[in-house]
Image (tube, coloured by chain):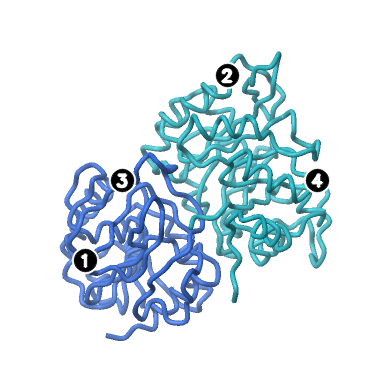
Amino acid sequence: MLTKRIIPCLDIKDGRTVKGVNFVDLRDAGDPVELATQYALEQADELVFLDISATEQKRKTLADLVLRVAAAIDIPFTVGGGISSVEDVAVLLKNGADKVSINSAAVKNPNLINELAEQFGSQCIVVAIDAKQINGQWKVHLVGGKVPTDIDLFEWAKEVEIRGAGEILFTSMDHDGTKQGFANKALARLNTEINLPIIASGGAGNISHFVDTFQQGKADAALAASVFHFGEIAIPELKKELNQQQIAVRIDTI
Amino acid sequence: MIAIIDYGAGNTKSLQFALERLGVKSILTSDPEQIKSAEKVIFPGQGAAGSAMKKLQHYGLDKVIRNLTQPVLGICLGMQLLCEHSEEGNIQGLGIVQGTVRRFSDKVKVPQMGWNSIHKLKGSLFEGISEASYMYLVHSYYVPEIKETVATADYNGTYSVALQKDNFYGVQFHPEKSSLKGQLLLNNFLNISL
């Protein structure tokens, strides 16, 4: 049976993890490779690396990091943050990324999704969508959720599917950082309207939020950052609880 | 020496790293002589079946692969291309095993993405790997159960996630991305002696 995925997200700046990471057993909490290795051992199902640096050397630093991560871990990982061209994607995939995630660049140039899917296959193209509600309507936002657009979340998700994306990573800006649970109503609607795997993001605060997003939001995967980085939720415990709630998850017995 | 067939289709870096972690050296090559003389051959693949077959034909590798006599492991699209025919682009595959590669029904999410449990495990590839182990899969097309099937998974019905015919092996999942169970499978392949 296909299992629901648990995905820690690591924010990267200049090749280092940012935001406080307070993770036991790490020698260097700023080293993304060490953190990634730890998560792989805890049976995280995938990882997402989101590069937020804005330097000239950004591309090269990220490409180097991808290579080091690929050498170290044996679970899939996605890389995102400022990716805007076929060339960007080619380098990251060549260095061992399994998927790339595009966000603002896809909104500005939707044809990029078609080009990437054609060149590399849909399976490695994730479109990340940041949205929040304005007057009860879910509107797509750009630049890490800062810039509103007139684009409707559900219309955009449909277009993204038609253009050849392989997966959607939906972050609710209304829920992100609140620790009050995921945007399950919007997720459930996406699930009925879109036939792609959907990753829920934004709002994880406790274990029951994950249960809810899989049961009510029908999400295929759930992504979170701080609850994992600060050790508030341990992945093995989370999976044990999901399993008890009859939600299929990967628990490897070795 | 292990040869990984390089024809511009697939995440070969991760595969090389996975072999490195097992202490095995590999070369990435599209040279027919190097491939023919390798002790074992890995045939990766990602993306569209049609363009992958065209690239193989461009390098003359379709004939080379068919005639290999050492153990060969097709991964993901590499496994699908061992088949006779694919609905994806309606193309002819290598025809090493009979059968047609089909697209998943829209009753389920396409692509299938994630960790699925594998069952009815047979043969040396699965030595020490227990029934219902999880492997990582990403695919929109699948091989139905056929007589060469040596492992299955369920996604809107039962289908093949591993095949074997003579010296040809294929896995639909990515062993290089399937944590310890995947590592075990790669190691089993490396230990096969015909």
Residue under numbered circle 3? B103
- Residue at the image point whose x is 31% and y is 79% from the top: B39
Q: Viewed as shown, does residue A38 lie left or right of A179?
A: left
Identity, as a three-letter code, of the amino acid under mark 2: Asp
Q: Which chain is blue?
A: B
Residue under numbered circle 4? A19
> Which chain does the residue under circle 3 lie in?
B
Do discs 1 and 2 belong to a common subunit? no
Residue under numbered circle 1? B65
Badge nearest the viewer, 4 or 3: 3
- Residue at the image point whose x is 44% and y is 61% from the top: B174
Circle 4/circle 3 CB separation < 8 Å: no
Badge nearest the viewer, 4 or 2: 2
Task: Bin the neighbour count of mark 3 within 10 Å (Cα to Cα): few under 14, some 14-19, many 20 and up.
Answer: some
- Residue at the image point whose x is 17% and y is 62% from the top: B98
How far is the residue under mark 4 from the one under mark 3?
A: 43 Å
Q: Viewed as shown, does residue A111 lie left or right of A81?
A: left
Badge nearest the viewer, 1 or 3: 3
* Residue A235 x %, y %: 71, 59
Which of the two residues, B190 or A224, is positioned nearer the viewer here? Answer: A224
> Which chain does the residue under circle 4 lie in?
A
Residue under numbered circle 2? A152
